[in-house]
Image (cartoon, rainbow, N blue to C red):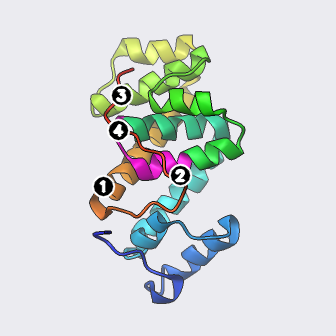
Amino acid sequence: MARIEPLEITDAPEKSRPLLEAVQKQLGFVPNIYKAVSHAPSVLDGLLGLGQKLGGGSLSPKLREQLALAVAGINICDYCASAHTAIGTKLGLSEDEISKNLRGDSDDPATVAALGFARSISDRRGHVSDEQVQAMRDAGFSDQQIVEVFAQTLMNIFTNYFNHLAQTEIDFPLVQTGQPQAV
């Protein structure tokens, strides 16, 4: 049972309603995470705004989803694993690739570097080493992309931790992460 109840659009604070309506229009439904975050309109606005702004960056939609999957695996967040598996599938990620991404792995060396960097950000609370930054550069990532991978990782940590707090009911086909995965 959810600790923080998801609010329907009509029950949400007035400032959250247009934000939830925009999500409804874009996705065709409002995921429970946004319904639960809607208790705090400023937080909902910030979360949606950050996601939108990062979506306009230089990282591909597939890599953004792969990062979300890896972070969900790191943080054992079944809600985000389920949501980003559904989104990743729509973007053309194979079942095998999604499974690897949840474990912080990939067949693509550049993706492996980005997912490993995300793990380092998470495990080391942002204190990544010079060698880890250089490994990203060696994998072909620009400084802009390194900053975007960092931001994408932190946004996903936020959603993972919020789902742990709220015990958000999963409204996507269930994907269970199990135990933390080693890279």
Asked if 58 appears above or below 172 in the picture, the reply is above
Q: Residue at x 54, y 26 (%)?
A: 143
Look at label 3 and name its amino acid: Gln
Label 3 crowd bin: few (<14), some (14–19), many (20+), radius 10 Å: some
Name the residue carrying label 3. Answer: 181
**In the image: residue 118, left or right of residue 146:** left
Q: Is residue 77 magenta?
A: yes
Q: Residue at x 55, y 54 (%)?
A: 173
- Residue 63 sits in quarter: top right
**In the image: residue 140, left or right of residue 157:** right
Determine the secondary structure under disc 2. helix
Look at label 2 and name its amino acid: Ala
Query: In this rendering, which labeled residue sits more in front, label 3 or label 4?
Result: 4
Query: In this rendering, which labeled residue sits more in front, label 1 or label 4?
Result: 4
Label 2 crowd bin: few (<14), some (14–19), many (20+), radius 10 Å: many
- Of label 2 and label 1, which has the lower sequence position? 2
Across and down, in percent, residue 81 comes to 47, 45
**What is the distance, in whole Å, between disc 2 and disc 1 at their CAs?**
15 Å
Who is closer to the viewer here, 18 or 74?
74
Name the residue carrying label 1. Answer: 164
Pointers 3 and 2 in contact (C-beta within 8 Å)? no
Write down the region rendered in magenta.
Answer: 74-84
- Residue 130 sits in quarter: top left
- Of label 1 and label 4, which has the lower sequence position? 1
